[in-house]
Image (cartoon, rainbow, N blue to C red):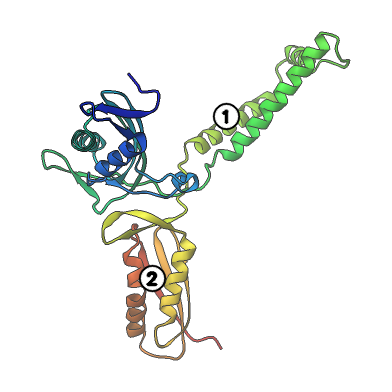
Amino acid sequence: MVDTDSTATADTGGRGTLVIKERAIERVAVAAALTVPAVVRSVGGISRLTGRDLPRADASVGEYSVSINLYVSLTWPCRIADVSEAIYTEVARALDNIVGLPLYRLNVMVAATSAGESVEQQVSDDTAVPASRPRPPTASPAALPVAVALAFGLLALAFVAGREFLIVHDTIGGAPWIRNTVDWISELHWAPWMITASGAAVVAGLILLAIGVKPRTQTHTGVTSSTSSSPMVWMRPTDVARMCSDHAGEVPGVESARTTVTKKRITVEVHRTEAGEDEALTEAVRDAIAPTLSVLADNRETQIRLHQARG
């Protein structure tokens, strides 16, 4: 039975009553959930806009038990089923020891995730399960222009069908486009141009099929850290090129540097201030850009090209 005053009331032997507000029970549940290692505080995203950080709880207090909806943020990666069981155990223990009411139902909702300290999670049999690699930012699908054109074509078809409906019911005047087109097609006979039209249709179909299955182009480069081999930050190739150029430009004997980054190669064009030993300058530039390249998730071939100072 749920108390209409949203409080928990317990008989203390005729000396009065003990009233426990829902807010107090919610705070106990949140504090208990935070004792589970995989549960972390989170104040970003929607929670920042609404002013309600994670974890948070909504409690429904009855006379003899408590039901709670608990919204949590978990470290990634983790086994959600095991974490949920641990949360239930800790919350039930805290409510029984502190509040004195048993936990009737606990609904755990994972509202957010954050990067953990390890890229591997340990399951109960001590087997390491590699974490899945997050998806990189990609460009718009190649089929997007075709989809937009098809959408406009369908809208135009709907307009023509509506116009035809109004003409048939004598609402508006005019020549029926659909009926006239069908009549024109029915009167067609074999003609040489049909071979060309058929070939063009086959080519167009193959092109559209290729566009439809073409994977989206990756637009950013992943950046790893010392605590995770999976990239959690993404940089544009332009940003990588600028960083390499800045580091290369600080090498003694380099007048200017320009870097080009492609999917497979990073090329650094170096203009030196004066003639000197090419091998030593090349190695110095390579060492200067090495810290930048070491954090990139994708390995690329590095080329250093030396040029004489600009006159």
Given the image, on which type of amino acid does mark 2 rest? Gln
What amino acid type is highlighted by mark number 1? Val
Question: Residue 288's quadrant in the figure?
Answer: bottom left
Q: Residue furthest top?
A: 169
Per the rendering, the mark at residue 202 is: 1
Q: Position of residue 189 (x, y in %)?
A: 73, 15
Q: Is residue 246 left or right of residue 193?
A: left
| Image-based side of 226 in relation to 210, left or right | left
Residue at 33% x, 71% y is 291
Can you say whether 301 is above or below 103 in the image?
Answer: below
Q: Earlier in the sequence, mark 1 or mark 2?
A: 1
Q: Quadrant of the N terminus?
A: top left
94 or 205, which is in the foreground? 94
Q: Residues within 10 Å of mark 1 (few under 14, many from 20)?
A: few
Q: Callout 1: helix, strand or loop?
A: helix
Q: Nearer the viewer, residue 261 or 182?
A: 261
179 to 232, vertically: above or below? above
Asked if residue 51 is positioned above or below residue 304 in the image, the reply reads above
Q: Which residue is mark 2?
A: 303
Question: For residue 132, which quarter of the picture?
Answer: top left
Q: How far across and down, in percent of the image, does residue 121 sit?
A: 20, 45
| Residue at position x 42%, y 88% in the image | 253
Residue 67 in sight from this viewpoint: no
Q: Which dot marks residue 180?
A: none
